[in-house]
Amino acid sequence: QQQVKQSPQSLIVQKGGIPIINCAYENTAFDYFPWYQQFPGKGPALLIAIRPDVSEKKEGRFTISFNKSAKQFSLHIMDSQPGDSATYFCAARNGGGSNYKLTFGKGTLLTVNP
Amino acid sequence: DTGVSQDPRHKITKRGQNVTFRCDPISEHNRLYWYRQTLGQGPEFLTYFQNEAQLEKSRLLSDRFSAERPKGSFSTLEIQRTEQGDSAMYLCASSPRGSGANVLTFGAGSRLTVL
């Protein structure tokens, strides 16, 4: 059972474009939603995270939009650069008993062409 | 560098052999996690330690898998009688107590190939 559904699987944009990656979840007990960035040969690195009590969070060129009623959240990358080419994972944490466990989406491979 | 270190980075073994991976977390982090990542998938939770106590073990971990964190510092993940389905990247992560507990720092992973 996939608890966090991520789309698209891959995405190609031109430099300066605004790629958008979407995630949806079913478990209303999720209370923390991070995005991780992973480069080849490296482990995932935390990019930005949001809690469901806010609808948007911005850090530099990265923005999370959160829609609690639709149980959806998305990552927007403004003014994308070739160095942003990586795999992006959304994740969610259960606020209940196992509140240390992250459930990840399947990932989106982003390619930013120069 | 005070990041999370994993060793070895790559292990090739034959089916039926035992393998052990080591993780050295960030020194002040009391929480340690193991995740498994297969090609085209996101990381999947395997197990969690708070200090030396193993607080949860996923159903993904069969009885061939064992993890330890004997002194609350480094951790080992052992796989006995490896199977081809065990081929994956094994990721270790750590996080501090308190408000930073949500911020997991991952290592680069140990890639296992079972022939």
Image (tube, coloured by chain):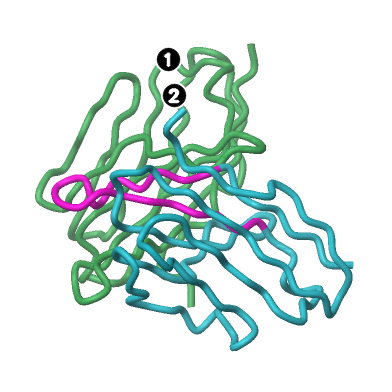
Q: Which mark is residue A79?
A: 1
Position above or below: B97 against B77:
above
Position above or below: A11 against B71:
above
* Residue beneath the point at 84% across and 80% down: B16
**Chain given the colour cyan:** B
Position above or below: A34 against A17:
below
* Residue beneath the point at 35% across and 44% down: B27
Pinpoint residue A5: horizontal percent, then vertical percent: 45, 61
Residue B15 quadrant: bottom right
Residue type marked 1:
Asp
How many tags in the picture?
A: 2
Contact between marks 1 and 2 (CB within 8 A): the answer is yes
Q: Which mark is residue B54?
A: none
Q: Residues within 10 Å of mark 2 (few under 14, many from 20)?
A: some
Residue type marked 2:
Ile
Residue B26 quadrant: top left
**Chain given the colour green:** A
The residue sitting at the front extreme is B71
As drawn, is B98 to the left or to the right of A5?
Answer: left
- Label 1 sits on a secondary structure element that is loop
Please give the range of residues in magenta: B89-107
- Label 2 sits on a secondary structure element that is loop
Residue A35 quadrant: top left
Q: Residues within 10 Å of mark 1 (few under 14, many from 20)?
A: some
Chain letter, disc 2 residue: A
Q: Which mark is residue A18?
A: 2
As drawn, is B21 to the left or to the right of A28?
Answer: right
